[in-house]
Amino acid sequence: MLRLSKDNYESWSIQIKALFGSQDLWELVTDGYTEPTLQKEVAYIADEKKALKEQRKKDKKALFLFYQGLDDSTFEKVVEATNSKQAWVIFATIFQRVDRVKQIRLQNLRGEFEALHMKEGEVVSDYFSRLLVMMNGLKRNAIEKSKDLETLTIEELMGSLQVHEQGMQKNASSTILEQALESKLTLNDQCNPGFNHGGARGRG
């Protein structure tokens, strides 16, 4: 599991949500559970005691899983948490970026996305990977997607990029051919200064 740091809270939280969801723990972490007073617990019937025991067990399991992704300094920040919900709130408070910082990041991502284009010599698969990383970053930061991106399928996007790549390759090939022809004509002029390109000898 990814180890939590001040720079990867978003990625870490995504992994945590997936992990806890697979263990049927996520609802417990977000909603918590009510810890009864000792007097109330004593009055519980057998089924209520069993349910409470199960809740406590699941909560400790969630805390243990949290601890697996923490270094010593981060662990010290949540060591006083008595349940998994408290720990989750502490993580969000400490590591989640404030709204102003998020807004700056969104603006940067938007600018990068608008300027994103295929590099010279870049194949579609590499460009496509960069594009997906950028799109995922936009989604994670709650940027509203345009209608075109909303309806565009992966297959359609890949096809469009491949057509674009073929066009770039064709243009590159044409440029190389033109340069080769120009070089050949220049060489002919240097070797046969008395002939024009139509084959007729020039007058001396």
Image: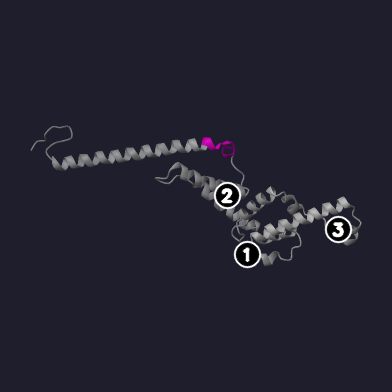
Left or right: 47 with respect to 116? right
Picture coordinates of residue 102 (x, y %)? 62, 55
* Camera-nearest residue between 108 and 151: 151
Judge depth for marks 2 and 3 and give the one in front.
Answer: 3
From the image, tell me which residue sits under label 2. 137
Amino acid of disc 3: Pro
Amino acid of disc 1: Asp
Q: What are the residue bounds of the magenta stretch?
A: 147-156
Picture residue at 66% right of the left edge, 53% below the top: 16
- The picture quadrant where one finds residue 8 is bottom right
From the image, tell me which residue sits under label 3. 36
**In the rendered structure, are the residues bearing label 2 and label 3 in contact, judged by CB atoms less than 8 Å apart?**
no
C-alpha gap between disc 2 and disc 3: 42 Å
Amino acid of disc 2: Gly
Structural crowding at the residue carrying mark 1, measured as other residues with C-alpha within 10 Å and reported as few (<14), some (14–19) or many (≥20):
few
Q: Which mark is residue 71?
A: 1
| SS at badge 3 | loop
Picture coordinates of residue 139 (x, y %)? 60, 47
Picture residue at 59% right of the left edge, 36% below the top: 151
Structural crowding at the residue carrying mark 3, measured as other residues with C-alpha within 10 Å and reported as few (<14), some (14–19) or many (≥20):
few
C-alpha gap between disc 3 and disc 1: 32 Å
